[in-house]
Image: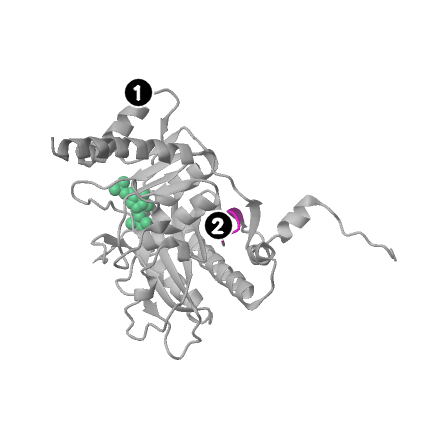
Amino acid sequence: MVDDYQPSSEQTLDRDCMTLSRHVLLQLQSFGPDAQDLSALMNRIALAGKLIARHLSRAGLVADTLGFTGRTNVQGEDVKKMDVFANDVFISVFKQSGLVCRLASEEMEKPYYIPENCPIGRYTLLYDPIDGSSNVDINLNVGSIFAIRRQTGDDLDRSAADLLTHGRDQLAAGYILYGPTTVLVYSIGHGVHSFTLDPSLGEFILTAENIQLPAHGSNYSVNEGNFWQWEESIRDFTRYVHRHEGYSSRYSGALVGDFHRILFQGGVFLYPGTVKNPHGKLRLLYETAPLAFLAEQAGGQASTGTQRLLDVVPTELHQRTPVVIGSAEDVALVESFIQERLREQEAIAAPS
Ligand code: AHG
Ligand code: MN
Ligand code: MN
């Protein structure tokens, strides 16, 4: 019998024990009710991620995973079967959790309110169940994006008006990236951390802590197919990166994958406004604000091109905003072209 037993200090054993829920409690240095809630919320997110990852891994083999439902959503977009499956997974894992009172999703015009016969919590989950769904049928990476906000007020009229506040009200934000491995990236305001799903354990294991978004990177990520739809300033930026050494175009059609690359390697992702959609395509409350929260927590920046993204106050649940997000220097470069054009327009408009 060894009396001064020393547990194996093997790194991998310690690492395998750093699960998501434990990490949240360590982050908060607390085991109080709020910390326990956030830990439980993140655990539910992780369960949703595992269920969606499992379904995606069998897409094509299992009926009703690929292709379209034939319906269009509130965005006017064709709904994929995977969008609906993932949307319902989040509802089912949160419905009995006693943690949330509502779930607001890209796929639902109004938030889903937890039914009376289920335990009601004091948080709201906002999510994009499948981001980049055009990639589902061709086996390319997709993601889920989430944000957690505390319920304020009683929302008796079910207008969910209390959700229409700036992104600095987010308690937690993150995404799950379904790629060669399934990765969960999150922040609760104490840095950005990445976990990789170990299918043999069924646990997300910490693989990168306090991620720092590089001050500059070579990647620029934008759909240049919209070149002639953009403001001249965005064309100015694009011409600049075309003419200068050291830039690479990387665009996957899934925001989560393009952002994940920039989070680790630096650079800038843009979805600017176009003539047809001056506010761009991406939705603030469950796409750009959660990623802006992460970007700033990791030392990067996120703006609409003219305003800090986390300061934007939406007027409606599915509001879109243009987005410029990534390395501080590269976001500033894009903004400098926008400011230059605005100064020119002001000079022209100024009375001579
Ligand atoms: P979603 O699948 O949730 O609608 O999101 C798709 C978004 C985003 O993931 C991606 O960056 C963008 O749409 C791509 O849009 P374009 O095809 O217009 O470039
Ligand atoms: Mn999306
Ligand atoms: Mn989506």
Specify start and end residues of the magenta stretch as a single range.
189-196
For residue 313: magenta?
no
Residue 162 in the image: x percent, y percent? 33, 65
The picture places residue 225, in percent across and down from the top left corner, at 23, 34
On-image quarter of the C terminus: top left
| Residue 258 falls in image quadrant | top left
Residue at image mark 1: 243
How many numbered marks have been drawn onto this rendered protein structure? 2
- Above or below: residue 16 compared with residue 241: below
Could you tell me the amino acid type at mark 1? Arg
> Tag 2 or tag 1, which sits nearer the N-term?
2
The disc placed on residue 159 is none
Q: Which residue is mark 2?
A: 184
Indicate the amino acid at tag 2. Answer: Leu
Horizontal side of 152 relative to 223 (left or right) equals: right
Q: Secondary structure at mark 1?
A: helix
Disc 2 packing (10 Å; few <14; some 14–19; many ≥20) = many
Which image quadrant is residue 96 in?
Answer: bottom left
Alpha-carbon distance for marks 1 and 2?
A: 36 Å
Q: Does the stretch in magenta take in 190? A: yes
Is 92 located above or below residue 272 in the figure? below
For the view shown, which residue lies furthest in the front direction? 352
Q: Of residues 192 and 153, which is closer to you in this image?
A: 153
Which residue is at 26% across, 40% downward? 272
Q: Residue 155: give x, y in percent of width and height.
A: 33, 72
Q: Position of residue 169 (x, y in %)?
A: 40, 58
